[in-house]
Image (tube, rainbow, N blue to C red):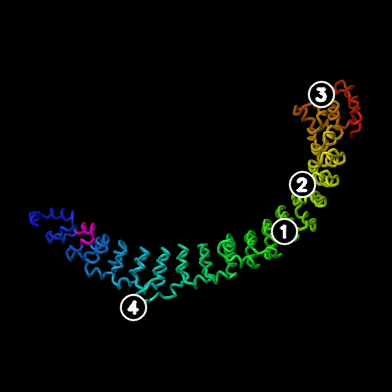
Amino acid sequence: MPTFLGMDMDAWRTAVKCDWRVLEVAPEELRSDRALMLSVVSQTGTALSLASEELQGDIELALAAVKNDVQALEFVSQELKEDGQFFLEASITNLPVLEKASETHRGDRALIRAAIKTNWNALKYATPELLTDKDLAMLAVRQHWRALLYVSEAVKIRWQSFQFLAPSLSCDSNLAIEAIRQDPKSLELMSEELRGSAQFMLSATKLQKVALSYVSEKLRGDLSFWRTVIRELPEDGWHLAFVQYGPLDLLGADKKTMLEAVKRNVEALSYGSDVVRGDPEVVMEALKRDWKGAKYCSRLEVNSISKAIAQDWRAISSYLDLLEPWRIEGMAKLVKINPQIVRDPRLGKVHEVMTLAVKQNGLLLACGTKELRDDRDLVDAAISQTWRALGFASKRLRNDKALITKALKQDGLALQHASDEIRDNASMVIDAMKRNPAAFRFAGTCLHADNSFWEVLVRTFYDTAWIKWLQHGRGQLSPGFSLPEEGAPLKAKASPVKAKVSAVKAKDSTLRLPPLNPDLRKQATALP
């Protein structure tokens, strides 16, 4: 103590700033130094106990002290302790100060409401009477669902008994929904009444799908509730019901529920009972939606499978799997709907079915067995539909002149599918070129090198674009053969013999054609 006697006030202030406890021996006037005390209580709130009585009633100083240490509240003036505004401002900086507030302040609705706006935890310091205030509870729960804990578990011990919150608040659906919006675990705190309400649980499920795991036992066995879930949640309601949370034994055996489910996703049918999966109405509804549902059906009929194969031929596989023994009943109707069903190997070997199919799409001849592609009647039917079917005929039938002629009448390019023998036949090649000059490239190699054949081509196609195309050097001629010059006086429809004579006699003609090959003379004179 004596060592302090010679210190001036600045030295005292420095000492106090270093250790606030120096105030206990410092001159009394320092305890009234507002600037000094503000600095001290900002570091150690309980230093407010050494401030002058006047400063203990200074709201700024008191707030600084309480902000640092809630225990400083013990040393603020009585006037401030009774000031609601002071407690509100103090709670903003240090919420637990409300715990030391009087019951009057903790029951002040305006004060608690203002505090909750800043921090939802302020609700736990409210009196039980305020905890039954729906608006205050909602204000807190909207910030965090755990505020519901203060509402549902709040009790007030009075006269050795518990006074619980009003039941109307703990069962309030709007308050509960706000909690669920933040965390579905809040359902654990909710009443059986709420968790047994179909409307409430549906609203909860739309917010949090896992809410379905909290439905009451009674509601869980309510099929109408699950149908509503499936209907109201079209994207995944069926999955929530059949796979995740619903009672599969009940749902899978209920026709009405299954009908609702397959309208959203036919995969739901896979979870049904054998009876439901074979029900005509359920099957029809499923296949009308998606052909893939056929694989989940326990029974299929022609009328129902027709809906599926109209979408995709692959649905026929499920239908054939269920036919024991396999039969062709109703197949004509199915082929008419989608002839592609013959791509299933089991149908590709049936003559009657293949015949029906190729009459609609000749290219489906490719789906037939090797034996059927060698069947003349079947190939003839396919070619009648499209010349391209010739490409799938057997080697034997691709040498059948009658079939080749039928194909060439549609398009000369059919020559590409003919046998080598046919493609070496000058008459067949020229006939093909009359339909399509581009067929020339499929002529046999021997004809490409035969000058006599080239002479016939010139006489036949002299005034066509094909000849002009060659005259401009865009094709490869037979070695030693030259085309007549463009504009030479050779008529396209003149007979080959007369054309030859005219060419020889015409002195001003530049056309010089070699004599006709005896083998081709007959073919050339027979040309129109």
Q: Which dot marks residue 429?
A: none
Residue 481's disc number = 3
**How far is disc 2 from disc 1 in space, using C-alphas?**
23 Å
Residue at 83%, 43% in the rendered image: 374
Amino acid type indicated by mark 3: Phe
Please report whichever mark, 3 or 1, sits nearer to the chain's N-terminal start: 1
Circle 1 residues within 10 Å: few <14, some 14–19, many ≥20: many
**Location of residue 248 in the rendering, given as x and y in whole percent from the top left corner:** 60, 65
Residue mark closest to the camera, 3 vs 2: 2
Pointer 2 residue: 367
Q: Quadrant of the C terminus?
A: top right
Which of pointers 1 and 4 lies earlier in the amino acid sequence? Answer: 4
Per the rendering, the mark at residue 307 is 1
Rendered position, 226 above or below 26 = below
Query: Of helix, strand and loop, which one carries label 2?
Result: helix
Q: Amino acid at mark 4?
A: Gln
> Percent x, y for residue 471?
78, 27
Q: Is 46 colored magenta in this rendering? A: yes
Q: Is the residue marked by circle 3 packed among few (<14), some (14-19), or many (20+) residues within 10 Å?
A: some
Q: Are marks 2 and 1 in contact (CB under 8 Å)?
A: no
Label 3 and label 2: CA atoms lie apart by 45 Å
Principal SS element in the magenta part? helix
Task: List the residue tagged with mark 4.
Answer: 160
